[in-house]
Image (spheres, helix red, strand yellow):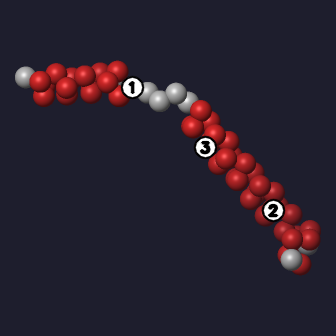
């Protein structure tokens, strides 16, 4: 508990908060993106066409 209040660890605490905030923001951003349909990828379409033949 003593480490939390010492000013020499202020940069460490700020860095941890910035990294944690960035990771959470990235996680929320990625979860909110609509899922892409894999069949719209031209490579997937080509492979499916090859497998049908």
Residue 11 in the image: above or below residue 21? below
Task: Give the class, few, some or many, for how many residues have Cα within 10 Å of label 1's Cα (few <14, many ≥20).
Answer: few
Q: Quadrant of residue 5?
A: bottom right
Q: Is 40 located above or below residue 20 in the figure?
A: above
Image-based side of 53 in relation to 32, left or right: left
Query: Which mark is first along the chain, 3 or 1?
Result: 3
Task: Find residue 27 and name its label.
Answer: 3
User: In the displayed structure, does residue 52 sit left or right of residue 14?
Assistant: left
- In the image, 29: left or right of 42? right
Q: Quadrant of residue 36?
A: top left
Q: Position of residue 6 (x, y in %)?
A: 91, 72
Quarter holding the C terminus? top left
Residue at numbered disc 1: 37
Q: Nearer the viewer, mark 1 or mark 2?
A: 1
Identify the mark at residue 1; answer none if there is no mark: none
Q: Residue at x 75, y 51 (%)?
A: 18
Residue 12: x, y in percent? 79, 64
- Residue indicated by mark 2: 13
Q: How many marks?
A: 3
Q: Which residue is located at x 59 percent, y 33 percent? A: 32
Tell which residue pokes out farthest to the left in this image.
53
Disc 3 packing (10 Å; few <14; some 14–19; many ≥20): few
Quadrant of res 46 = top left
């Amino acid at each position: 508990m003593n480490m939390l209040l010492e000013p020499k660890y202020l940069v460490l605490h700020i860095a941890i908060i910035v990294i944690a905030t960035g990771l959470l923001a990235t996680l929320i951003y990625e979860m909110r993106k609509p899922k892409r349909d894999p069949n719209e990828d031209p490579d997937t379409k080509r492979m499916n066409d090859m497998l049908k033949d």
